[in-house]
Amino acid sequence: MAWSVVAKAFAKVFHKQCSKKEGKDNHHEEKNAQYSARLRNASDPVYNRINNLYPYIRERDTATDEVTAVISAYQEVYMEIGMKAGARLLYQLMVEDEKQPAKSAK
């Protein structure tokens, strides 16, 4: 099994999720709104605290940039781990599916 098959399968799934048409899929829009609300609820207290701790814009911008850099690093690491785990799971499922005998249509 070539990894290109796995990559194509992931690309197809992500393309489908990213290229949703307006009004066609409200479930994804609702989920995106929920994600946005969760992120906002988690980040607002941190950025409000930074604003209160650093009254000067330059200091505030530096602190905000540092927090954003840390969050970005975590996001990149966990995204990579998730993609690798997902690819391995997909590969295992495909191998298991190939091992099962084909069901005959009756």
Image (tube, rainbow, N blue to C red):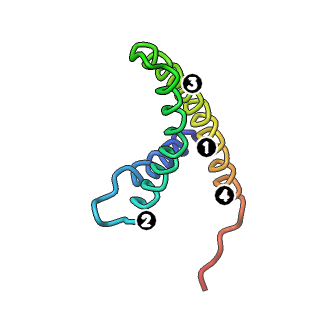
Q: Position of residue 81 (x, y in %)?
A: 64, 36
**Which one is nearer the viewer's eye here, 21 or 27?**
27
Circles 2, 3 touching at the beta carbon (< 8 Å): no
Q: Is residue 76 left or right of residue 59?
A: right
Of labels 2 and 4, the one closer to you: 2
Q: Quick one: which residue is furthest to the bottom in this view?
A: 106
Q: Mark 4 points at which residue?
A: 98
Of labels 4 and 1, the one closer to you: 1
Above/below status of 40 relative to 68: below
Q: Is residue 77 left or right of residue 56?
A: right
Earlier-in-chain disc, 1 versus 3: 3
Kindly report the distance in space between the C-alpha atoms of the residues bearing marks 1 and 3.
26 Å
Residue depicted at 65% across the width and 69% down the height: 102
SS at circle 3: helix
Q: Of the numbered discs in the image, which one, if any, rests on residue 87?
A: 1
SS at circle 2: helix
Residue depicted at 48% across the width and 19% down the height: 54
In terms of image quadrants, where is residue 27?
A: bottom left
Q: Name the residue under label 2.
A: 27
Residue type for callout 1: Ala
Kindly report the distance in space between the C-alpha atoms of the residues bearing marks 3 and 4.
42 Å
Residue type for callout 3: Val
**Which one is nearer the viewer's eye here, 39 or 47?**
47
Q: Where is residue 43 in the image (x, y as percent from the top left)?
A: 51, 38
